[in-house]
C-alpha cells in the first residue's frame, strides 16, 4: 500500500510536470507567432519622413505606397512640364527681342525686361538640367549687335527643342551647354543696351 501511495504521488508529479511543459511550449509558440522577426522594423504610421527608400519598405503592394508612387510621378511630370514651358517662353522671348531689334535697331526698356526675364528663365532651365550656378565663359558671341540678336533667337529656339526632347530623368550636357551660351549672349546684349 505504501508503494501505491508513492506511485500515485509520483504519477501526480509527472502529470503536473507534463501539464507545465505543455503550457510552457504553447506560450512559447504563441509568443513566437505574435512577435515580429528580428531585422524587420515595425511600421510607424505617424512617420511621414520622405527619407524612406523603396528597397527598405516591405509593404510593396500597399495602397499607401501605390498612392505615394503616383504622387511622386505626378510631381516629377509637373516639374518637367514647367521646365518645358520655361523653355517655350525663352524661345518666344528670343524671337520677340529679335523682331523688336530688327524694327528699331536699338533696345528699349521693354527689351531690357525681356532680356532679364530670358536670363532668369534660362538659369532655371540650366539648374533643372543639372548645371551649376557658375557663369561659363562663352567664346562664340558675335561682335556685331545685330548678329548677336539673331544668334540669341537661334540659341533660344535650339534650347527649347533640346529641353522638349530630353527625358525628365536625364542630366543633359547639351541643355546645360546651350543654356550657358544663351546666358552669355543675354549678358552681352544687356551690357550693350546700357
Image: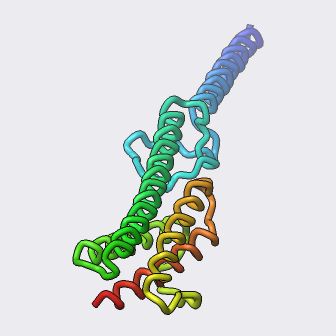
- Of 41 and 69, the residue lying toward us: 69
Residue 94: horizontal and vertical position, in percent? 42, 68
Q: Quadrant of residue 110?
A: bottom left
Residue at image location 56% in from the left, 54% down from the top: 164
Q: Quadrant of residue 25?
A: top right
- Of 60 and 66, the residue lying toward us: 66
Q: Residue furthest front?
A: 103
Residue at image location 37% in from the left, 65% down from the top: 96
Residue at image location 50% in from the left, 49% down from the top: 76
- Of 121 and 43, the residue lying toward us: 121
Check the picture and name the quadrant holding the C terminus. Answer: bottom left
Q: Is residue 114 left or right of residue 149?
A: left
Looking at the picture, does residue 98 appear above or below residue 181?
A: above
Check the picture and name the quadrant holding the N terminus. Answer: top right
The colour scheme applied to this rendered structure is: rainbow
Residue 83: horizontal and vertical position, in percent? 46, 57
- Of 114 and 151, the residue lying toward us: 151
Q: Is residue 44 left or right of residue 19?
A: left
Residue 100: horizontal and vertical position, in percent? 33, 70
Residue 118: horizontal and vertical position, in percent? 38, 70
Looking at the picture, does residue 98 appear above or below residue 21?
A: below
Residue at image location 45% in from the left, 53% down from the top: 79
Q: How many marks?
A: 0
Amino acid at each position: 500500500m505504501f508503494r501505491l501511495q508513492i506511485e500515485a504521488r509520483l504519477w501526480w508529479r509527472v502529470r503536473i510536470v507534463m501539464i507545465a511543459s505543455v503550457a510552457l511550449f504553447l506560450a512559447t509558440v504563441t509568443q513566437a507567432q505574435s512577435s515580429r522577426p528580428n531585422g524587420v522594423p515595425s511600421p510607424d504610421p505617424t512617420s511621414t519622413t520622405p527619407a524612406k527608400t523603396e528597397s527598405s519598405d516591405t509593404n510593396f503592394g500597399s495602397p499607401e505606397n501605390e498612392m505615394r508612387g503616383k504622387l511622386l510621378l505626378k510631381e516629377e511630370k509637373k516639374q518637367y512640364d514647367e521646365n518645358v514651358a520655361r523653355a517655350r517662353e525663352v524661345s518666344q522671348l528670343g524671337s520677340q527681342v529679335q523682331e523688336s531689334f530688327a524694327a528699331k535697331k536699338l533696345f528699349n526698356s521693354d527689351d531690357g525686361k525681356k532680356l532679364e526675364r530670358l536670363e532668369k528663365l534660362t538659369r532655371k532651365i540650366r539648374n533643372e538640367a543639372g548645371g551649376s550656378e557658375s557663369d561659363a565663359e562663352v567664346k562664340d558671341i558675335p561682335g556685331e549687335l545685330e548678329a548677336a540678336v539673331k544668334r540669341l533667337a537661334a540659341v533660344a529656339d535650339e534650347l527649347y527643342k533640346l529641353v522638349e526632347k530630353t527625358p525628365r530623368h536625364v542630366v543633359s550636357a547639351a541643355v546645360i551647354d546651350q543654356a550657358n551660351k544663351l546666358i552669355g549672349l543675354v549678358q552681352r546684349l544687356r551690357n550693350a543696351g546700357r
